[in-house]
Amino acid sequence: MAKIIALVNNEISVGKSTSALNLSILLSKKKKKTLLVIIDSNFIFSYLKIQFNQIKLNAKGSIAPFVLGEYDKYFSILALKEKINQKVHDYQKLFVKQIQLVETKYDYIIVDINRNLEKLIDASLKISCKAIAVYDSHNFSSLSLQKTLNKIQKSRSINSVLKLFAIVLNNYDHIKHIASLVQINKIIGPNLLLITLPHREELLKVNQEIIKFIKHNLWDDYVINLTSLVDEIIKDS
């Protein structure tokens, strides 16, 4: 049975999708069968087909409107085949049903859902064992962290195994952003796993360069830091 890990944040351009992709690939490189679930109103089937032309997209193991694709033995992607239309589909029920259908086939399922799809985010937290909060260091605030904590706490009333496992701070500068660490320590305490990732211009190009990453790692600093998070995830499983 897969360990389901949800990446959360209610802000735009914090590096959540980049982190989800990198975590998924790093887990797969450790020979852990990993499914990256990426649900975004703009991340539709046609975009997938262009960007991931080496991934075999097929209906096997997927429920419409979702589509499942394999890159290799250890790395797969699940995405929407169409634009979000809440009037047509009850995505919450379909999402949970889809995950239940495939979760026995994977070691890990990494979930990245568009911040505007609140009901889907809530559904993902209700079936996840871990949540990883992702922030941009330039815009981090105690208020945004508290909102994330409140959302996780609300989900814990239904899913008691869910826990905030780590915080990822993107674009971190150890001189400029030390106050962020002080805030996190004050709110949560010193025992939470905290990953700080340096700024790289390539992170801003994730939509254009995503397939190149799979072929060749463009973000060495980023991945080196995330490796420690991957090791902790495996250790905690």
Image (cartoon, helix red, strand yellow):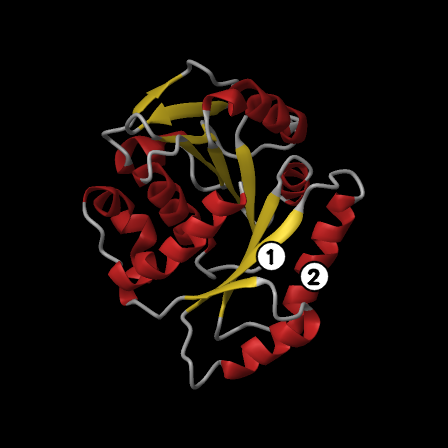
Q: Viewer-nearest of labels 1 and 2?
A: 2
- Which numbered disc covers residue 147? 2
Q: Quadrant of residue 222?
A: bottom left
Q: Name the one closer to the observer, 205 or 78.
A: 78
* Label 1 SS: loop
Residue type (three-letter) at the residue carrying disc 2 = Lys
- Which numbered disc covers residue 10? 1
* Residue at 27% across, 50% down: 208
**Residue 178 locus on image (x, y percent):** 50, 82
Residue that extends furthest to the top in the rendered view of this protein: 60
Q: Are marks 1 and 2 in contact (CB under 8 Å)?
A: yes
Residue that extends furthest to the bottom in the rendered view of this protein: 175
Left or right: residue 70 compared with residue 147? left
Q: Quadrant of residue 219?
A: bottom left
Q: Name the one closer to the observer, 125 or 58.
A: 125
Residue type (three-letter) at the residue carrying disc 1 = Asn
**Residue 143 locus on image (x, y percent):** 68, 70
Residue 148's place in the image compared with 185, above or below, is: above
Q: Name the one closer to the observer, 128 or 41.
A: 128
Binning the other alpha carbons within 10 Å of mark 2 as few (below 14), some (14 to 19) or many (20 upward) gives few
